[in-house]
Image (tube, rainbow, N blue to C red):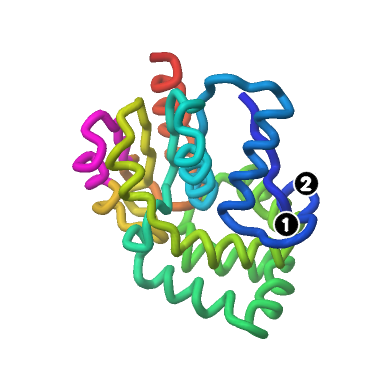
Amino acid sequence: MLIPDLPGCGETAAGDPPFTVTSHAEFLDAFANRLGLKDHDVGGICLGATVALEYASRFPERIDRLVLHTPIYSPQTLRAAFKRQVAAFTAGPVFWVVDRLRRNRVVSDLYKRFLVEGPGVDPYDAQVNFDNQLRADGRAARQWLRDGVTRDYRDFLRGWRKPVLIVVAADDRTVDVNAIRGLRDLMPQAEIRVIESAGHGWTPTLIAAQVEAISAFLKA
């Protein structure tokens, strides 16, 4: 399994703008070409799933299977409260205050605990998540988020007939889980796994269930 750091994330420098879903998909294309990848699977989590969808829509002949975890595949997928958060926290001068506050562990944990993730997040995964926040480039994150929440891949998914696994937590606070359940209307072949008693945060329950679902799908 290959997990590249997208521009502005992890060990990959942001480079020059734009920092959009399209530019990230082009980065994946260059990554795959550099490694000489032929047919392969592609997947992503949240906004990473949006990049995976853009990549698959551009190079469908390359992709065997899709794995989409909490996919933001359309503006209609997002909960209204999360849309308001995105609009407020990425607006003008507000974002640069947010960008500084995200580096404060206490502030970050409180925000995620009460507005995004919920309780019971695995301590190791919480630390990894925060470490990744510190390494992320604020400019790249802001543009990617603002662009990603506007993308609509319903027409692409309607025509996708290869295997696809969709994983989402039943109590996720960012996406409308019923809308994701409804993806089966667009893709009758889709395997949709809704993990009960879990939210957006990576709790032990969510970790175990998603590992089981993804492993079983890839082995099939």
Q: Is residue 105 left or right of residue 125?
A: right
Residue 190 belongs to magenta span: yes
Quarter of the rendering occupied by the N terminus: top right
Q: Is residue 170 left or right of residue 174?
A: left
Q: Earlier in the sequence, mark 1 or mark 2?
A: 2
Place of residue 99 in the rendered image (x, y in percent of width and height, measured from the top left): 70, 72
Taking the spot 68% from the left edge, 61% from the top edge, the residue there is 18
Quarter of the rendering occupied by the C terminus: top left
Taking the spot 71% from the left edge, 50% from the top edge, the residue there is 7
Place of residue 33 in the rendered image (x, y in percent of width and height, measured from the top left): 68, 29
Residue for badge 1:
136
SS under mark 1? loop
Which mark is drawn over residue 121? none
Taking the spot 77% from the left edge, 46% from the top edge, the residue there is 12
Tell me the distance, in whole angstroms, between the alpha carbons under discs 1 and 2. Answer: 9 Å
Q: Is 195 or 38 nearer to us in this picture?
A: 38
- Residue 126 vs 107, above or below: the answer is above
- Residue 125 vs 208, above or below: the answer is below
Residue for badge 2:
12
Magenta stretch: give its range.
181-194
Place of residue 123 in the rendered image (x, y in percent of width and height, measured from the top left): 61, 47
Q: List the single residue furthest toward the top.
A: 220
- Residue 163 vs 10, above or below: the answer is above
- Crowd band around label 2 with a 10 angstrom C-alpha radius: few (<14), some (14–19), many (20+): some
